[in-house]
Amino acid sequence: MTESATPSIASVSTPPVATTRCARGGWVWLLVLLALAAGGGGAWYSGQQRAKRERAADIEAAQRLEALESRLDRLRGDVRGHSQRLQQADATNRVLRDELLGMNQRAALLEDNVAKLADANRQGAQALRLDEAELLLTLGQQRLLLAADLDGARRAYALAAGVLDGVDNPGFLNLRQTLAQERAALDALAADPRRIALQRLDALAAKLPDPAVLPRAPVPSANAPWWDRVLARLVSVRRTDAPTALASEDRSAGDIALQLELSLARTAIERRDATALRAAIERADAWLVRLWPASPQRRALRDEFKTLRDAPLTLDIPTLGSTLEQMRAQRGP
């Protein structure tokens, strides 16, 4: 009994140790659970805090982003406003530039119009001066050729030179030089050959004898034999080598023919026709020989006829009319 009781006592005393161990293990597990719970709570708390901070950061970032976007919007608005103002300024500058260009163009047009007006006035005055000079040159040339008025031609050419001196166009310098040469040739001319020939013709016509004093046919005197007086009425005896017309009717016709030839000679001189003058003088010389018997006076008259026949009628001025021709060629049609 005793032995059997001992083991039971031993078995009875064993469970408290196991209970202690179990209690210790429970506390450990409790502590572990508490630690895990504390760790989980801390982790959860830290996660919550971190999430809160992240949310706050996100909110702040969102606010900042929103603020930035609003600032960007304001900046975009400002940029658009500046762009609009720049566009308006560009448009204004463009308008001002166009107006300035228009003003410059109008100023240029005004300058051109003023220049054209001034040039037109100048060209008009110059054209009037040239017309006046051309008229004076034409008058001078015609007075010299038609009226043999050398002094009048010189005055007309002098007036034309004064008019050309008032033309300031350098293109007419050669024209003025040509006019100076033509004036020098006119000044060197003593007289018009036509006027000299007319004077010679007038002097020669004045020297011609009066038909009343021309020699007549010899009349037999009262003391001549009767047959001489009878035959004198029927036959006129004269030298065969002397073509003198002694009959009264022949003398009158011859004198008229001589005066006619002198008139033709005068007309030829007026027309400066040397051929017609030569023919008229030769015919007049033939009538002079028939009307006037041989004498020193007749020889002198015939010599004057020959001189007049060979006299020049045209003006020996190679440059006459050159200024007028050059002016007309330079001015054009």
Image (cartoon, rainbow, N blue to C red):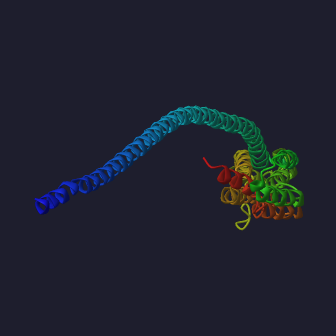
Percent across and percent down for residue 298 are: 84, 61
Percent across and percent down for residue 213 are: 86, 48
Residue at 83%, 51% in the rendered image: 195
Callout count: 0
Q: Is residue 264 left or right of residue 198?
A: left
Q: Nearer the viewer, residue 244 or 52?
A: 52
Picture quadrant where residue 225 is located: bottom right
Extreme-bottom residue of the structure: 241
Picture quadrant where residue 171 is located: bottom right
Q: Quadrant of the N terminus?
A: bottom left
Q: Nearer the viewer, residue 37 or 175?
A: 37
Q: Nearer the viewer, residue 171 or 322?
A: 171
Percent across and percent down for residue 30 are: 32, 48
Can see residue 220?
Answer: no
Q: Is residue 266 left or right of residue 303?
A: left
Percent across and percent down for residue 105 are: 64, 37
Can see residue 48?
Answer: yes
Q: Is residue 137 left or right of residue 83?
A: right
Extreme-front residue of the structure: 1
Q: Is residue 89 above or below residue 176?
A: above
Q: Nearer the viewer, residue 317 or 38?
A: 38
Q: Is residue 37 above or below residue 197?
A: above
